[in-house]
Image (spheres, rainbow, N blue to C red):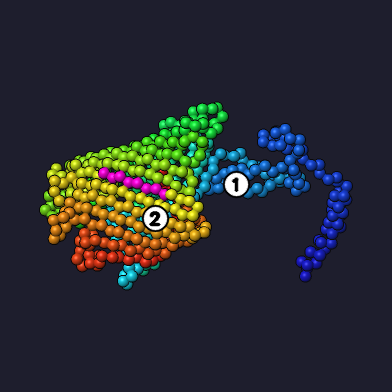
Amino acid sequence: MRRAARLRRSLACLAPALAFALAAGSALAQAEPPPTPPPASPTVSGSSAATGSTTAPATTATDPIAKPDAPVVHDSSAPSVPGRADAKNTPAASGSEPGRTVQAAPSGHEGRFEFGSYGRVQVGSDLRGGTGRGTNVVAFGPRLVDEGSYAELELRREDRWSEKVSGRIVTTVGLFPPFFHFTGKALQAIGVRNLYAQGTYDKVTIWAGSRMYRGDDIYLLNWWPLDNQNTVGGGVAFPVWKSTPEESTGRGDGGAAPPGRSAYETILQLHAGQQRLDNPYQFQQVPVVAPFGFGTVDVTRLDRPRTIETLKLTQFIRPSGGGPSGFKAVLYGEAHQIAAGVFRDPLVNQDRGLPSDTGFLVGSQLTWFKGERDTYATLFMRHARGIAAYDPLAVPITFALDRTTGSASETQIAIAGNYETEHFSVMGAGYVRFFRDGSAAETSTQKYDEGAIVARPSVFLGEHFGVSVEGSYQQRRLQLLQPGTNDPLTASVAKLGVMPYFSPAGKGSFRRPQIRLVYLASARDSGTRALYPALDPFAQRSVEHFAGISTEWWFNFSSYP
């Protein structure tokens, strides 16, 4: 009670003083004039005053400082730094001075992430209660049905620091069948197809890493007939010569070239890389007694990667008139080397020497392109000797007497093209290939001639639908006698198929995605059936069917150099 009484007496004493303070503050607020606006900010380069305009920058009562004409370009993935344009624009007021927003100067760096993909998925029946199967007997047969399911997912980083300097980092993951929804097993085969960095300074491009390093393909055969490297290495590309507008046109204004004058550009690409396959031909580890403790440890006994150097010279020629059509000519070469090594034979526990080996490949390409509606025609030729006759992801299975690939050779000639109009298109392709291994044997499955030809006419039904019909013939002739005869073993397959499809992206031979219904019939001769074991149904049936559904897509993809 005593404490409460003392508190009431204290508040009674303070009340007159508090009332006087409030009254004085109210009188001062009514007598003080409004604050004077701050002086205008100084003119900066790029403002309207600097360009000679007399119009002042627009201001508002709440924001007396003019905003920049355009936001500062910056890399949104960079860390946030105080004072930068990507920091929060929170005004910092001091006394009665209004808040000011600080804008950082442009850094000149632009960066972004890109996503792309290629893929195809199919499923079908053989109309006998089983799964539909591919029927090709040559190395590069028509892709319809035989291509199978496959997909690639690509994440790419694109950067530009200046007009001369840019960069790219590419990661591509390949997904191999069978997929989970078909087998019920959550085990997916995955391969890293691209993992490399690339930079460009002025007109020179340099790259290093693991990548698919390819040129032009033949779509109907799903094949890269000239240059197709799966490499871990690096390379450089730069223009050797390019005609100036004056040289192309004969005038100083860079206008359309008069008759008889064309534009030229020459590009040189160099590359070196390696593959060391997990195969006893190139790599072997053997168990040995551990130097300490118990058990064994693995020791690398054989380690000999294949080293490949490539050179590609590309010439572009664009005829007079400045149109999109033109020619592309390519000269291409490869050099292959593999070192000597020692292989431990696990059957007899003895060492076996493996000699060094070399090879070379030369080839060329000539392409004409219209530049409209994907119309083009191209010719490929190449010849390889020694170990270069074998794909870098494959190993020879027969050898010369000195255990090298010896005089192994491969010669290929291929053609491809597409003709397209507003209402229909015709794609076609074909090739012949002559392969000889280095062994001294007169007869071998590794000595053969083969070829294929395919045509796919398509009719466009409106803007988004169409029907394609595909016919093909393929044959392989081996240096073996067909069982029961004195004739060479010759295997051939003739195919005929129909494919109605829906194309959301519009009509065109190479517009994707496509969603398709597929029917394909394959007629197989006795030589083809002889290639299969007796218990395989393919050794007994002369006609195979495939009826199913498929889809294919690609977008924003950078698998080509």
Which quarter of the figure has residue 272?
A: top left
Is 330 left, or right, of 373 in this rendering? left
Q: Is residue 405 above or below residue 244?
A: below
Q: Residue at x 61, y 40 (%)?
A: 104
Quadrant in the picture for the N terminus = bottom right
Which residue position is annotated with label 1?
86
In the image, is residue 415 part of the stretch drawn in magenta? yes
Residue 415, position in %: x, y? 35, 46
Which quarter of the figure has residue 45?
A: top right
Q: Residue at x 54, y 27 (%)?
A: 251
Mark in the foreground, 2 or 1: 2
Q: Tell me if I can see residue 111 in this picture.
A: yes
Which residue position is annotated with label 2?
456
Residue type indicated by callout 1: Asp
SS of the residue at dot 2? Answer: strand
Q: Is residue 191 above or below residue 197?
A: below
Is 274 left, or right, of 289 in this rendering? right
Residue 301, position in %: x, y? 20, 47
In the image, is residue 335 part of the stretch drawn in magenta? no
Q: Residue at x 21, y 61 (%)?
A: 526
Q: Main secondary structure of the magenta part?
A: strand
Is 259 left, or right, of 20 in this rendering? left
Is 420 left, or right, of 50 in this rendering? left
Quadrant in the picture for the C terminus = top left
